[in-house]
Amino acid sequence: MSAEVFYDDDADLSLIQGRKVAVLGYGSQGHAHALSLRDSGVDVRVGLPEGSKSRAKAEEQGLRVLSPAEASAEADVIMILAPDTAQRSLYAESVEPHLTAGKALFFGHGLNIRYGFITPPADVDVAMVAPKGPGHLVRRQFVDGKGVPCLVAVEQDATGNAFALALAYAAGIGGTRAGAIKTTFKEETETDLFGEQAVLCGGASALVQTGFEVLTEAGYAPEIAYFECLHELKLIVDLMYEGGIARMRYSVSDTAEYGDYSRGPRVVDARVKEEMKKILAEIQSGEFAREWIAEDDAGRPNFTKLREQGAAHPIEETGQKLRSMMSWVDRPITETA
Ligand SMILES: NC(=O)C1=CN([C@@H]2O[C@H](COP(=O)(O)OP(=O)(O)OC[C@H]3O[C@@H](n4cnc5c(N)ncnc54)[C@H](OP(=O)(O)O)[C@@H]3O)[C@@H](O)[C@H]2O)C=CC1
Ligand SMILES: CC[C@](O)(C(C)=O)C(=O)O
Ligand SMILES: [Mg+2]
Ligand SMILES: [Mg+2]
């Protein structure tokens, strides 16, 4: 069944313009939400801890910055855009004490609600507005008069108005210009985790590294292997992004297209699909979320080791050398605000 999609005409921006909004966090998503809501005529304050390096930036960009507790006390709509692992303690220490009846608690991703790390009181609205793109793109599109599609979900509708309020918030950041897709916290969280683990981050990184290893172990130059297994992936993904897998297959040579059909399914075979199903089951049961939060609580020992191992993979050294030969790549992500 297709999802319901809502546009500007379905949203009443005045609902959010009439509320005091606190945006907790000023990173990728936080800066885009706070600035765009302000530009949409919403009364916004940003909540950041005293030592946060984002404080100066938010103030320079003309926003009022308070502590998370002060911002939560003032606001009647509180959007949590701190890192997922920081949200539990942020909520317990700074939000919960000020979450009085009728207020609304918003999220940009459903992990903490879906797995019960945060349990808001029954008399507040709980909703999600999750742009399907990084915050810098969300902000750039908004400034250009466009928008990034976003997901909108309601977990708890205490006031009877939670969905309309979430849609108004989505309109305030440009989301309903492109389309706001109705979902649930369960669907957003489980599919987001599956996508990043099995395909977008985990699957793609492992595929690239393994292809690079196979070529270099067979004696081919790492520079050539880098181009074939990593650099050109962008060209292929750009084609898919613009017109789906069919467009990519139309644009590559017939030789590549035949290799795709006849060899691809041997790489991602039935065993890989079974493993993907196991990964999905770990997400659905909460096993992954519990493991990740316990890892974070323990100071991230395994995460740190894996991060170091990833950074030490030979493809990184080769890539650094090759990217320095290409003036148009390796640019820092630029701020757009
Ligand atoms: N990045 C993305 O593309 C997307 C992210 N999301 C979701 O949005 C949420 C935010 O992610 P993202 O924008 O990437 O996060 P970032 O890591 O980019 O930014 C986090 C921000 O939160 C601040 N922060 C850290 N701890 C606290 C705290 N205890 N109280 C208040 N603020 C704090 C950080 O401050 P400092 O600068 O001092 O560290 C920083 O400003 C997450 O739930 C994520 O899943 C959803 C869709 C896409
Ligand atoms: C794909 C990674 C992501 O899920 C995202 C930007 O959507 C994330 O958690 O960063
Ligand atoms: Mg995602
Ligand atoms: Mg994610």
Image (cartoon, rainbow, N blue to C red):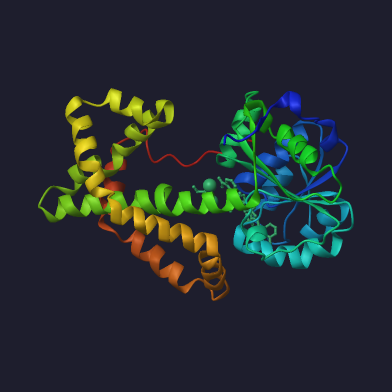
The answer to whether residue 316 is visible is no
Which quadrant: the C terminus? top right
Q: In this view, does 57 lie to the left or right of 200?
A: right
Q: Which residue is drawn at 70% across and 46% down?
A: 58
Viewer-nearest residue: 54 or 152:
152
Count of numbered circles on the image: 0
Which quadrant: the N terminus? top right
Q: Quadrant of residue 63?
A: top right
Q: In this view, does 150 lie to the left or right of 49?
A: left
Viewer-nearest residue: 20 or 150:
150
Q: Is residue 96 left or right of residue 52?
A: right
Where residue 76 sits: x, y (%)?
86, 49
Q: Residue at x 51, y 54 (%)?
A: 193
Query: Is residue 136 placed above or below 255 in the rendered structure?
Result: below
The answer to whether residue 69 is visible is yes
Viewer-nearest residue: 236 or 42:
236
Where residue 12 sits: x, y (%)?
81, 30
Query: Is residue 245 placed above or below 280 in the rendered structure?
Result: above
Viewer-nearest residue: 23 or 162:
162
Q: Which residue is drawn at 51% across and 60% down?
A: 283
